[in-house]
Image (cartoon, rainbow, N blue to C red):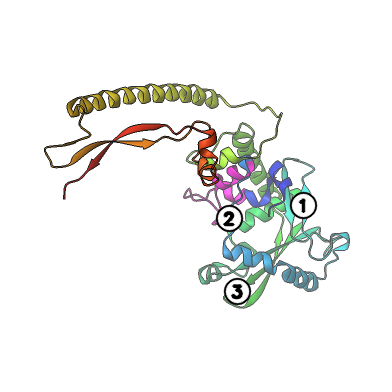
Amino acid sequence: MLDPRRRNHLTASALPKIMKDGSGRYISEFGDEQAVYNWYIFGVQQEAGPEAALGHMMEPGLTEHAIRHWGLETGVHGKSEQVFQISRREPIMACTHDILPVGLWNGLRVNVELKTVWSEQRAEQLGHEADEIFDDWKVQTAGQQYVGELDATLLLVAVIPKREMRYYVLQTDSSLCDQLVSLGIAWWNRHIVPRVSPDGCTLPPLSYLKSLRRDEGSVIELPDYVQEAWLEMKDVAAERLAATKQCQEREDELKRVILGAMGDASAGSMPNGNVLRWAMQNSSPSGVRGGGYEGLRRDGLFEQYFEQGQHGVLREKRSR
């Protein structure tokens, strides 16, 4: 379950999901702008895949291993407790550190990021040097370094297919951090603040939006397109009602033609051999909705409180 505080800040883990490479593909393989927008605006949490779930299960053990390997002092943060931090320079930015040591490591202010690699393909793609890690990791750790005002990130990677641990020291590139954060904040102000979904993104299902638990009494400023959508929705609703009325009138006229041809006969055979029959059936009592009167009927109370109405319907019986 994601920390709900993260919905108030652009997190380092969200940065790779909103950024694209030179070919126009999202840097992250595990989410995109739509997932990020839907999380911040609607609270729709992206479902974690089995690899991510296994990675979370392994975090306590990886945390212990990282602390021992690098000789870290964790102090009040404990040995397996993640640390949520908000940037002092840009309060809209935040991140969650897997480990945030107390004091310095080799004279450097550092954090620790834990990763797992499960697929053979990604294991082959992952290099052994700091500049050979995946781009989404570079972007995420740069965001963490900005928020924590760090000198470096210690990256521990469990490469499952190769049954090995890899250790990286990612030095902070301040110019890269500033550039990524600037792009992230621009995205936030372009989409989250005005509640304008990114191009090509789809909203959650209507059933989900209807079921949202809303903050009673809260009033927000809506973007211009909402007013346009509201006016169009009213026009569509009016057209639907008019069409429904027109369809009902046409149906009644056709029914009148059929029953007029049948006269007082209860049924009639059409040229194709099928038989139309005017049949009477029970109507639902107006006092009980949804057919709930069946229980009253079983208890012998139906006849005491309700009168059974009937209405006629045309039924078609196909010839054999």
Residue 61 lies, in percent from the top left, at 73, 71
Per the model, the C-alpha gap separating discs 1 and 2 is 21 Å
> Regarding mark 2 in the picture, which secondary structure is present there?
loop
Picture residue at 80% right of the left edge, 59% below the top: 100
Q: Which residue type does callout 1 highlight?
A: Phe
Residue 38 lies, in percent from the top left, at 58, 43
Does residue 291 appear in the picture of this structure?
A: yes
Picture residue at 49% right of the left edge, 21% below the top: 231
* N-terminal label among 1 and 2: 2
Q: Is residue 240 above or below residue 148?
A: above
Q: Is residue 168 above or below residue 224?
A: below
> Regarding mark 1 in the picture, which secondary structure is present there?
strand
Per the model, the C-alpha gap separating discs 3 and 1 is 28 Å
- From the viewer's side, name the closer residue of 45 and 306: 306
Disc 3 target residue: 160
183 vs 90, left or right, is left
Residue 12 lies, in percent from the top left, at 68, 50
**First to last magenta residue range:** 15-40
* N-terminal label among 3 and 1: 1
Choose mark 1 or mark 2, whichever is in front: 2
Q: Is residue 294 above or below residue 108?
A: above
**Disc number for residue 84:** 1
* N-terminal label among 3 and 2: 2
Disc 2 target residue: 47
> Regarding mark 3 in the picture, which secondary structure is present there?
loop
Q: Which residue type does callout 2 highlight?
A: Glu
Picture residue at 38% right of the left edge, 21% below the top: 242
Per the model, the C-alpha gap separating discs 3 and 2 is 22 Å
- From the viewer's side, name the closer residue of 307 and 154: 307
Q: Marks 3 and 2: CB-CB under 8 Å? A: no
Q: Which residue type does callout 3 highlight?
A: Ile
Give the quadrant of the N terminus.
bottom right
